[in-house]
């Protein structure tokens, strides 16, 4: 939504958006990133872990780089000083060129943010076979707590993570988002616009206090109120790029 607001302001002044790089991460607050993965789960571990096994497609300098192991594309995000983050591309970024009407863009990348060290641990888990989704009749993990067997190493690991890497009732999380938007103005000047969002969760409120709960739940609640107040007589899923929804939600 913040990106759409920036796009709209640029177009209104006669500019063109020529590049768009967006990275977002839902993370534990730094003081609670206290495990080798430097990550905790506020939603389904299996769904979250599946994303690291998927490939990614993006546009870079007018070309679509060949696919490969997702974790091999991780790189330091040094522009976010103080958070010690790394980023990697997420799913198919090229589709957003049409969704966001970025016809002049030579670079379109949407990616994920994690604390440095996350991808190193994930790569080790993959190499050790713990991310294997093929059926496995028997499985145990090296822990004092017995792992629940779920048919394959990946599902067993995900279930184990849901027990040992869940947020505690007094822990808080963190949402970090960084948009870098390249703009070309009518006089051929170029500008790099940077839009950032950092939201911390609230300690002592359990899941209701998580930043992830607020950033996901509040826009949905705002959309529901807009429908109830006559914004639309249809009950449908609203794409987050619709300006008529984005601007009121951002405000």
Image (tube, grey):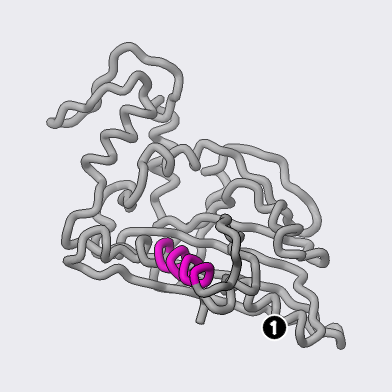
Residue holding disc 1: 9
Q: Taken as a whole, is the magenta stretch helix, strand or loop?
A: helix
Q: Using residue 13 as the reference point, say whether residue 230 is left or right of it.
A: left
Which residue is depicted at the point 43% across and 25% down? 132
Q: In this view, does 217 lie to the left or right of 245?
A: left
| Relative side of 157 to 86, left or right | left
Location of residue 119 in the rendering, given as x and y in whole percent from the top left corner = 44, 46
Magenta span:
216-228
What SS does tag 1 mark? Answer: helix
Magenta segment includes 227: yes
Residue 69's image quarter? Answer: top right
Q: Mark 1, residues whose alpha carbon is within 10 Å: few (<14), some, or many (≥20)?
A: few
7 inside magenta stretch: no
Q: Is residue 140 above or below residue 91?
A: above
Residue 219 to residue 236: above or below: below
Residue 156 location (% of width, % of height): 31, 27
**Residue at image location 24% in from the left, 26% down from the top:** 141
């Amino acid at each position: 939504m913040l990106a759409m607001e920036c796009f709209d302001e640029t177009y209104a002044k006669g500019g063109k958006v020529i590049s768009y790089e967006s990275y977002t991460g839902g993370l534990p607050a730094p003081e609670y990133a206290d495990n080798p993965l430097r990550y905790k789960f506020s939603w389904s571990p299996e769904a979250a872990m599946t994303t690291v096994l998927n490939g990614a497609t993006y546009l870079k300098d007018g070309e679509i780089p060949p696919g490969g192991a997702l974790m091999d594309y991780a790189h330091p995000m040094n522009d976010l000083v103080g958070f010690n983050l790394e980023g990697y591309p997420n799913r198919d970024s090229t589709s957003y060129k049409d969704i966001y009407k970025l016809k002049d863009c030579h670079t379109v990348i949407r990616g994920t943010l994690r604390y440095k060290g996350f991808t190193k641990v994930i790569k080790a888990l993959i190499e050790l076979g713990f991310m294997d989704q093929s059926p496995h009749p028997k499985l145990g993990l090296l822990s004092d707590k017995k792992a629940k067997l779920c048919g394959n190493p990946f599902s067993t690991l995900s279930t184990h993570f849901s027990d040992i890497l869940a947020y505690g009732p007094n822990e808080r999380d963190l949402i970090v988002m960084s948009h870098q938007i390249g703009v070309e103005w009518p006089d051929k000047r170029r500008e790099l616009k940077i839009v950032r969002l950092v939201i911390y969760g609230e300690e002592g409120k359990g899941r209701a206090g998580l930043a992830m709960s607020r950033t996901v739940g509040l826009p949905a609640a705002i959309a529901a109120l807009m429908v109830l107040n006559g914004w639309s007589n249809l009950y449908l899923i609203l794409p987050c790029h619709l300006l008529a929804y984005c601007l009121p939600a951002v405000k």
